[in-house]
Amino acid sequence: MKSRFIIIAVLLTALAMLAFTATRTITGKVTDRTGQPLPGVSVTLEGSSLGTVTDGDGNYSITIDRNDGKLRFTFIGYKEAVEKINGRSVINVKMTEDQAVLS
């Protein structure tokens, strides 16, 4: 009986470890205020070295190792955007021009 309890405890611990270390992919599209796609936007996971860049249609895909945190979107001439992940797998972002940079 005691050995069954130990085996069950080990299996539950292994499953919990897998759940906390599982990777997941977040996708989305980055557009300007008029809905036009923005290619070349830098998308990074705050507090890590993980990142990617949007493609020609403004789409991105980033694989992360957590369910929480923030994605940071930066592009020259636009205000930085930060989005909380909150377990979402699709995060679309609308960026606005930074008038101070454009002037």
Image: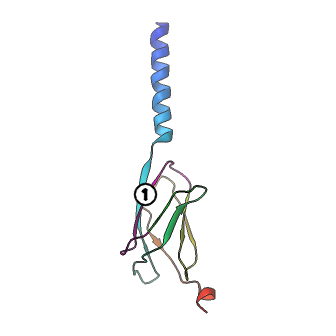
Seen at 46% across and 80% down, the residue is 32
Position of residue 83 relative to residue 10, above or below, is: below
Seen at 48% across and 14% down, the residue is 5
Of all residues, the one furthest to the top in this rendering is 1
| x, y percent for residue 6 | 49, 15
55 or 28: nearer the viewer: 55
10 or 44: nearer the viewer: 44
Q: Amino acid at mark 1?
A: Ile
Q: Is residue 55 magenta?
A: yes
Q: Is residue 48 magenta?
A: no
The residue carrying mark 1 is 26
Q: How many marks?
A: 1
Position of residue 25 relative to residue 79, above or below, is: above
Seen at 45% across and 46% down, the residue is 23
On the rendered image, what quadrant is the C terminus found in? bottom right
> Which span is picked out in magenta?
54-69
| x, y percent for residue 79 | 58, 78
Position of residue 103 relative to residue 94, above or below, is: below
User: Residue 98 vs residue 51: left or right?
Assistant: right
